[in-house]
Image: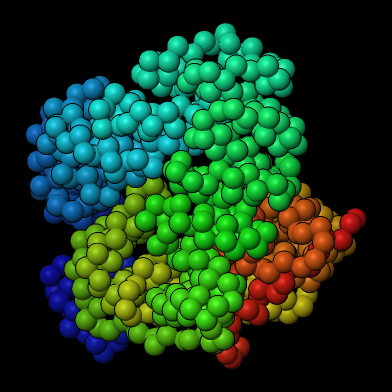
Amino acid sequence: MKKLRVLCATTYQFYGRLFALGCVFGANGAAFAAEEQFNDALRAANSGNTALLDQYTASMQQDALGYYPEYWKLNINLGYQPSGQIVDFARRYPQSAMAEKLAADYVEEKVKQADYNNAQPVVPYVTNPDQAESCAVAQVRAKSGDPLVFAEFKDLWLSTESLPDACQSLGRMMLSSPLMSTQDKQQRLWGQLRAGQLGAALATAQAMGLNLSLAQLNQIQNSPLNYLWSAPKNNATDYAYLIFALSRLTQTDLDSGLSAANRAAENVPEPVQKYLYRSVAYIGGTSVLKNNFNRIVLNYFDASYGDLAFSPEEAEIYARQAVRFGAWDSVMRAIGSMSVTQQQEDRWQYWLARAYEQRGDANSKRIAMGIYQRLAKSGDDYHNLLAQQRLGEAYSKRIQYQPTASDFRRLDQDIHFRRAFALKRINASDIYTNREWNWAVRQAYLREDDGLLLAAAQRAADMGWYDRAIYAANRTINKHNDRLSYLTPHQNTVVSYSQNVGLDPAWAYGLMRQESRFVTHARSSVGAGGLMQIMPETAKQVAKKMGETYNPAVLTDMNTNVRYGTYYLSMIQGQLSDNAVLATAGYNAGPNRARRWQASTGTIAADQYVESIPLSETRDYVKNVMTNATHYGSVLGQGIQNIGKWMRAIPARLEQ
């Protein structure tokens, strides 16, 4: 064993990466014998056999995956384990993926039990929490005497989106805090009433000393328009019912809600008036799929602007409505209403620059150009590329870094990557493999070790592990390799089928990368499959158009999947004005939706169309595919690139 490892290390520089791959993955004997116990130990864990897990803990001690049997044992009845056991595990396996997960899961379990004392010692080991874990940790901090933690969750406090249980519990805890003002509680109540969340609204009202009646709310819900005609407007309880009634009417019939807003807003205090206007605006802005775009919605957002703070959700919907209609002063107001963190995001900085640019005066244009220049230099994502376009600059190809022998040696020594590769080698579940890989990437990213990330990406790409290779290559900070970030597997097939139907291969690759990250067996929750994530009904349609008999099994075949996918993309491009942005939106959401989102008259700039797409999945999808296509144009050697090549103006909708 020792001789094999020495040989690999000393001869790597002569035989390069492929030899190293053979050393790491080609030795099928003693080097990985212990790793192969992983699946046996997992079966013992699934059956609750703790005695057998103890045996595997002993036999796998020296293995890269040796901490798993102990992790699984602790995870059995996790909420009833002593906190000292969790802390001990975290200390013996510092900064490891499963120690962090164990700690985070333990804190969540203890918070569910309201056992904050035992959760508290484990909190420092939760270093990468998701939203639910963050809310659980916040509850522990608050119970440990840190009430100021609530200020960090003010945005969540006003959210009416679906939240994890831990975040809902945190909201209830915040409700009883003296740090939350009467105005804070009032706005939370109004938001819950607007969203129709009656149980939560009644709890908030009770904490405020308001006696809202469920029977009255149900009566209003059954006939909101009748209530609005004679609604009393004398006190906080009346205002709550009024907001609920206008919101229910608007949800049912947007036009009726818009028409009733002014009457509802008569003779009420200014904050109530503004919230009534904001309610119809927010509902109109979030129901575009049902009601299409309506300029009056933006007018009501403008009318609601003032001292009444916008929640992050409200500010984003306001900004998108303003972008859609090119109302640049409203864009600036909406962005100014956002939290500082929101305002600093590249997307809103880009739209702030667009708004300044439209003002026309020299100082505003200087501000716009300054923002564009900063964005153009700070990255290579969608809004960075758009900023380059606004400056008239071509896509700037980055210096390409090739990982060195030293980078690969560090890769072989890195325990996090060793675990990930070991799991991949024994074909462990993606649940474990991807977690270890993503954790390894995170640790390298935090150390700004770009060479290690690119070495890992190269090795993964050589194995055909394309999705994780891209994930690693995308996380570099100073050193980059576009051929790893924008891999081109199956190149002859993709280029040939794209050209056969008149598609730019860069676009086909950009879409494929977004759809599947080149995972051939990828399957979505709605049944789409393969490299280009084709729905069975779409495949039937394409097969018929191509004069072929449809066979469901062919979607798992790489050649057929690419052939059908490129044909379908070309087909909907022809249906949607030969416009790449429209066709990309149509590929994701369906061509009929993409068509509905076009303006009824006149053209609209492509960036405005994309930002106002009402489905967040499709909006992000189009941004990513257009970004990918720009990069792939460079990788495929197509000369100077600019995202403007793909972002042609969106024509008015043609009536079908």
Decide if residue 149 is in sight here. Answer: yes
Residue 279 location, quadrant: top right
Q: Position of residue 569 (x, y in %)?
A: 73, 65
In the rendered image, the residue lying farthest to the right is: 656
Relative to 99, is 650 above or below?
below
At horizontal 60% and vertical 38% (from top left) the residue drawn is 277
Q: Position of residue 282 (x, y in %)?
A: 59, 41
What scheme was used to colour the molecule? rainbow
Quadrant location, the C terminus:
bottom right
At horizontal 57% and vertical 39% (from top left) the residue drawn is 278
Q: Nearer the viewer, residue 164 or 600?
A: 600
Lateral position of residue 483 relative to residue 498, left or right: left
Residue 512 location, quadrant: bottom right
At horizontal 15% and vertical 44% (from top left) the residue drawn is 124
Q: Position of residue 445 (x, y in %)?
A: 28, 66
At horizontal 14% and vertical 32% (from top left) the residue drawn is 145
User: How many discs mark residues in the rendered view?
Assistant: 0
Relative to 416, is 86 above or below?
above
Q: Nearer the viewer, residue 647 or 304?
A: 304
Relative to 83, is 634 above or below?
below
Quadrant location, the N terminus:
bottom left
Decide if residue 627 is in sight here. Answer: no
Q: Nearer the viewer, residue 487 or 147?
A: 147
In the rendered image, the residue lying farthest to the front is: 267
Lateral position of residue 385 relative to residue 260, left or right: left
Q: Position of residue 439 (x, y in %)?
A: 29, 56
Residue 446 location, quadrant: bottom left
